[in-house]
Image: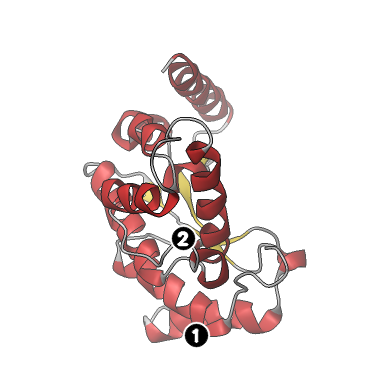
Amino acid sequence: MLWTDSLRETYAAIYKHVKDVNPSLGVGWHICSTNSFNPIYRAEQDLAAIAPVSDFLKIVMYHNCAGERMAGYIDSVHQTLYGDVPKQQLLEFHYRVLGYQEKSLAEIPFAGLSADYVYRETKRSRAGLKGAKTQLWPGIDIDIPTEPGHSKCTPDGTRDAVVAAFRGGADGVILSRKYSEMKLANLRGARLALHDLGLA
């Protein structure tokens, strides 16, 4: 909490200084992918507490590479904090605590996480803002690199993730991480989602 409290103080200082220069400039924060894996880290991310100094929040919901990253996280904490818990049971514990229903540890590096994960995270984040005017912009994975043979983005996967984000209460999405990584076919999946939603 010492780190988290310091981070919130930094957010508040930056917000104040930006608004002093130009009140119309938007100020927001990137909430990293650890929020999707580590329930202790997530518990410290009080969105309502940072909402007064946040015009928007980009919360990482990288559904595709999340499978690989979740498996890596489970492997790491199995070697340290939870060494006595078998890995699959440890993953299932995290799913229960985090509110997910995803594939087994053997499958997730190759399948990624589902659009349902994006929906659940968006809905949870919207509830966590407790009615604040802060805009919620989930970060959607388009071709963030994964290991050879592991899950890769598809146009349908992108489309489903974007639809899930809006269904969960997003104000918009940030197509992530960077354009130079993205395949146009997968980027087109986001446009198809907006068409499905009547937003394009």
Of 7 and 147, nearer the camera is 147
Question: Which callout, 1 or 2, points at the residue further toward the start of the chain?
Answer: 2
Q: Is residue 27 visible?
A: no
Left or right: 188, with 61 as reference point = right
Residue depicted at 31% across the width and 44% down the height: 133
Residue depicted at 65% across the width and 84% down the height: 185
Q: Is residue 21 visible?
A: yes
For residue 63, the mark is none
**Label 2's element?**
loop
Q: Quadrant of the N terminus?
A: top left
**Label 1's element?**
helix
Percent x, y for residue 31? 49, 42
Of 89 and 43, nearer the camera is 89
Q: CA distance from mark 1 to mark 2?
A: 31 Å
Percent x, y for residue 142? 61, 68
Going by the numbered disc 1, the residue's amino acid type is Leu
Mark 1–mark 2 CB contact (< 8 Å): no
Percent x, y for residue 66? 52, 58
Residue count near mark 2 (Cα–Cα under 10 Å), binned few <14, some 14–19, many ≥20: many
> Residue 197 falls in which quadrant of the image?
bottom left
> Residue 145 falls in which quadrant of the image?
bottom right
**Which label sits in the foreground, 1 or 2?**
2
Residue depicted at 49% across the width and 69% down the height: 107
For residue 192, the mark is 1
Residue depicted at 32% across the width and 58% down the height: 100
Q: Which residue is mark 2?
A: 105
> Residue 199 falls in which quadrant of the image?
bottom left
Of 168 and 11, nearer the camera is 168
Left or right: 57, with 75 as reference point = left
Going by the numbered disc 2, the residue's amino acid type is Leu
